[in-house]
């Protein structure tokens, strides 16, 4: 099991930036695929981005490609989501998730952090 705690959410104007952080504990972090998901009000949770255990492989949802960047620091047991050029439709609760494979990277979840983008 791994415990995940997100931080960094808040209120930002459209066009602005935020950096989300996810701190992990309880299991060898460097062995985990990590991902960010989000859930907007009234909508289902959706995939945002994922990163391989080494940090060399990343993959993004089309809706955030070119605006968001996922990264990790295995020495700090942390994964980040840099969000630039934010749009009102990026408003959501953002969740960190992790697992030992891509198929199981939703095995562990954080509690979420709120991001609100105002027009």
Image (cartoon, grey):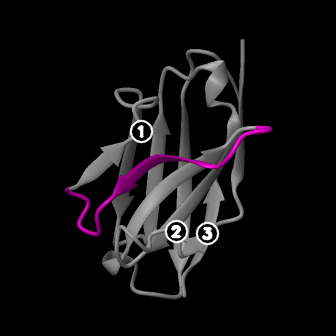
Q: Position of residue 105 (x, y in %)?
A: 45, 69
**Quadrant placement of the N terminus:** bottom right
Residue 61, numbered circle: 1
Distance between the Cα atoms at labels 1 and 3? 19 Å
> Are the residues tagged 1 and 2 within 8 Å (C-beta)?
no
* Start-end of magenta stretch: 41-56
Badge 2 is on which residue? 106
Q: Position of residue 69 (x, y in %)?
A: 38, 40
Badge 3 is on which residue? 109
Observer-side mark, 2 or 3, equals 2
**Quadrant placement of the C terminus:** top right
Observer-side mark, 1 or 3, equals 1
Q: Position of residue 19 (x, y in %)?
A: 53, 41
Q: Is residue 9 visible?
A: no
Q: Is residue 100 left or right of residue 24?
A: left
> Are the residues tagged 2 and 3 within 8 Å (C-beta)?
yes
Considering the numbered disc 3 on the image, is that residue within a helix, a strand or a loop?
A: strand
Front-most of residues 82 and 44:
44
Front-most of residues 66 and 30:
66
Q: Residues within 10 Å of mark 1 (few under 14, many from 20)?
A: some
């Amino acid at each position: 099991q791994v415990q995940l705690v997100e931080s960094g959410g808040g209120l930002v104007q459209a066009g602005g930036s935020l950096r989300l952080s996810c701190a992990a504990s309880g299991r060898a972090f460097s062995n985990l695929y990590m991902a960010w998901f989000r859930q907007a009000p009234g909508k289902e949770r959706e995939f945002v981005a994922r990163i391989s255990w080494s940090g060399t492989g990343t993959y993004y949802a089309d809706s955030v490609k070119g605006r968001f960047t996922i990264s990790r620091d295995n020495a700090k047991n942390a994964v980040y989501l840099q969000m630039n050029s934010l749009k009102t439709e990026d408003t959501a609760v953002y969740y960190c998730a992790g697992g030992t494979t891509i198929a199981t990277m939703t095995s562990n979840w954080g509690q979420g952090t709120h991001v609100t983008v105002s027009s």
